[in-house]
Image (tube, rainbow, N blue to C red):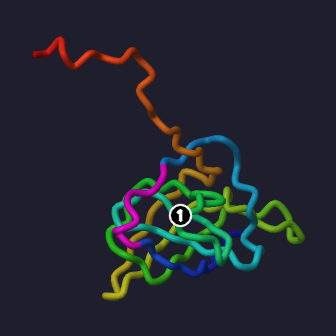
Amino acid sequence: MRKTGTVPVFALCAALGPAPAAGQSGNCPLTTWEPDIVARAAPGSGQVELRKKGAPPAAPAECAISLDCEVRAEPVRIEYELATLAGPKQAPLYTQVRRVVFTFADGGMQSCASHGASVPLARPKLEYQGPKLNPDIFK
């Protein structure tokens, strides 16, 4: 049996930059029954970020649903299709999302398959750790 649900969407502005890289540091613990979960999808990104309502935009996402396509524009609505539920009293997890459908302001739609939901890895801060170069040797 397939279930369909809707997640409220607040699309990220392009000014916020690219979406953080998602990794497989663990399965997403969020369920679709949890209140105050906000889904965000930036145009050009290949994922839907799930955040707690009221979290600052710079805060890392609680979970991310990776997609097999890039979101073509800023969506006004996100719907998701779940795989078969484990049981009637168990809350479905976002890891059970199999397909995500975006609706846009112009009435267009886009459908993407899900590769699953995971907790995004933090981006490591890259800093050069090697020896210092003497600028005088280049004169």
Q: Based on the picture, tell me whether residue 14 belongs to the magenta stretch.
A: yes
Residue at far right of view:
89
Q: Is residue 84 above or below residue 24?
A: below
**Residue at (66, 77) in percent of width and height:** 53
Quick one: quadrant of the C terminus? top left
**Residue 34 vs residue 6, the one in the foreground:** 34
Residue 128: which quarter of the image? Answer: top left
Residue 92: which quarter of the image? Answer: bottom right
Q: Is residue 26 above or below residue 12?
A: above
In this picture, residue 104 sits left or right of residue 48: left
**Residue 89 vs residue 44, the one in the foreground:** 44
In this picture, residue 95 sits left or right of residue 124: right
Amino acid on which disc 1 is placed? Ala
Q: Which residues are magenta?
A: 13-20
Residue 1: which quarter of the image? Answer: bottom right
Where's residue 124, x and y in %? 52, 38
**Residue at (63, 58) in percent of width and height:** 63
**Residue at (77, 74) in percent of width and height:** 33
Residue at far front of view:
136
Q: Main secondary structure of the magenta part?
A: loop
Where's residue 118, x and y in %? 63, 50
Residue beneath disc 1: 58
Residue at far top of view:
137
**Residue 12 vs residue 35, the one in the foreground:** 12
In this picture, residue 100 sits left or right of residue 53: left
Q: Residues within 10 Å of mark 1 (few under 14, many from 20)?
A: few
Q: Is residue 131 above or below residue 38?
A: above
Where's residue 106, x and y in %? 31, 88
